[in-house]
Amino acid sequence: MPSEISTVVDLLPFEKFFRAYISYFWFYSFNKNRTVSSVVEAIQKGVDRTVQAMPVLSGVLKEDKQTGHVYITYNCSRTLVSLAHATETLEELEKSNYNQNTCKIFVEQKLELTNLPGINNIPVLQVQVIELGCGSLCVCIMCHHVAMDGAATAYVAESIGRASRGLGVCAIECNRMWLNKLLHGLQPQETPGNRHIRRLGKLAANVVNMEETRRHQIGIDLQGVGRLKQLDPECSTNTLVMALMWRTWTRTLVELGSRSEFTYLGWPIDMRTHAGQPNYLGNLFLPYMGYETKHFVLNEPLPVVAQRLRDFTQRTSLQELSGYNQSVINCDSDTRSILEQSDSPALSFSNTTRMPIDQVDFGLGALQSVQMLHIDAPIMMFAISSGRNILINVVMPQRVAKLFKADAEFSLFARFLY
């Protein structure tokens, strides 16, 4: 790949605070007709062609701690696919439900590649082929969240998969000058939600002890999805799942002694369609927050709670994205006053179930499972599709997980995998 003069791509202020890799793992069973070296070679071709089309993927993050300036510098150098080996077998991983608290393949990956002290000189993209103890394979693709969000990472993975099979790369936009113009005047500032969460530090500890957290995964299988959809066939599965989690979380807060009148839920809305940039490479989502009284969330039928979430979602528009600086996390005066009265931490729900994570094809046969590495942020749920199942990663205190598991309505649709 030809070398070019190093180019600096400045980051938007809100992008500077996402200091973790978004990491996806695709697992495939052993196939005697393929060799590990041939798989690495094929995926390397996919990476080369994708990076050639999107040179910023070859970059590294740079940070000036004195000025707070963060940027990506790249010169189209080659991003090498690494080969790693794991002692665990696919059967062992499946028996543990891919438990990220105990499975070495996840624990070691997190230690080596994600829990880093800073972001200086860290690659934007990392790709790895992992040979399991039984000869099965895992493909891991990681994009740093400072540079792009979960949707963009999914598009990059899809492009690598296509190119590794000899097909064309995905058309992904990287017009960051366009986005800077769209969000003109955006300045780094503390959001009302962040102020609220910090203010609640001591207060929330009385309701939810954040020191005793553990990684968990919630699974909703095909039957669970079907039961949810029977409640309201016209409502999206994602909205129904969000409503279920919000209601369970609210009941849990009441059990733990929360006395505030309101409960609230935060989630990111992918603005690519609104902005006319469906394949934008970067972070392009609008953090959003909805609130309601606990009485409403706990006593109205679940489809009515879901409808309330739809009402919040429909308020988002390109105009709001353009006015991001004035309405950071869309906290209007009403929402801000509600937050000031709350005694509980927020539940955040991030959905990637409509992204083609489980449809990425590296030409390695039938996919056994796809997993997303936990981002260790308490009470933040990250949902992906794995086959016909919805997998939701969340870090929460043990006593919160215990109350979720004991919740009768929650148990009708979902269960804890670990």
Image (cartoon, rainbow, N blue to C red):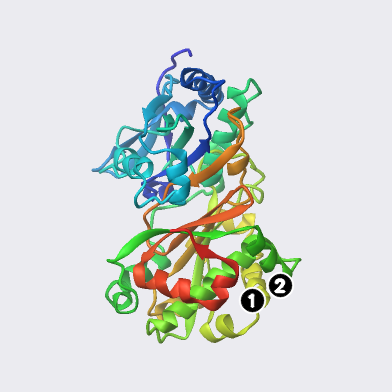
Mark 1 residue crowding within 10 angstroms, few (<14) / some (14–19) / many (20+): many
Residue 349 is left or right of residue 6, and the answer is right
- Residue underneath mark 2: 231
Q: For the point 48% across and 81% down, which residue is it?
A: 262
Query: Which one is in front, 331 or 299?
Result: 299
Kind of residue at badge 2: Leu
| Quadrant of the snapshot with the C terminus | bottom left
Check disc 2 and report its element: helix, strand or loop. Answer: helix
Residue 170 is left or right of residue 349, and the answer is right
| The quarter of the displayed image where residue 124 is located | top left
Residue 47 seen from this side = yes
- Residue underneath mark 1: 302
Query: Which one is in front, 212 or 416?
Result: 416
> Which tag, 2 or 1, sits closer to the chain's start?
2
Residue 171 is left or right of residue 247, and the answer is right
Q: Is residue 106 above or below residue 394?
A: above
Q: Report x, y in % for residue 115.
A: 30, 45
